[in-house]
Amino acid sequence: MEGESCIPPGFRFHPTEEELVGYYLARKVADLKIDLDVITDVDLYRIEPWDLQ
């Protein structure tokens, strides 16, 4: 979670279940790029819970 976000002020990420499964999850499984860096990959086994933000 390094660097600055290119998301404009006021942006809200609130996808429907259909959008999450049909677009984001399907693209993740197919190893395709997601155009918006709202969902990041985090290796939870390498980070302590209190360090997550």
Image: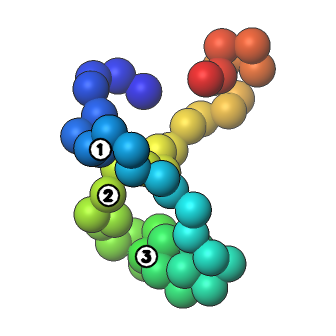
Relative horizontal placement of residue 22, taking residue 49 as reference (left or right): left
The residue where tag 3 is placed is: 27
Which of the image's four quarters has the N terminus? top left
Pointer 1 residue: 7
Q: Amino acid at mark 2?
A: Leu
Which mark identifies residue 36?
Answer: 2
Specify whether 2 is left or right of 24: left
Give the amino acid type for the residue marked by disc 3 in the picture. Arg
Give whichever of 2, 6 is nearer the camera. 6
Q: What is the count of numbered marks?
A: 3
Residue at image x 29%, y 34%? Answer: 5
Instruction: Indicate which label's residue lies in the foreground, 1 or 3.
Output: 1
Furthest-front residue in this view: 10
Please tell me whether mark 2 sits on a helix, a strand or a loop. loop
Image vertical order of residue 12 relative to residue 17, above or below: above
Give the mark nearer the N terminus: 1 vs 3.
Answer: 1
Q: Residue 20 at x, y = what percent? A: 58, 74
Q: Residue 44 falls in which quadrant of the image?
A: top right
Between circles 3 and 2, the one closer to the viewer is 2
Q: Nearer the viewer, residue 41 or 20?
A: 20
Circle 3: element type: helix
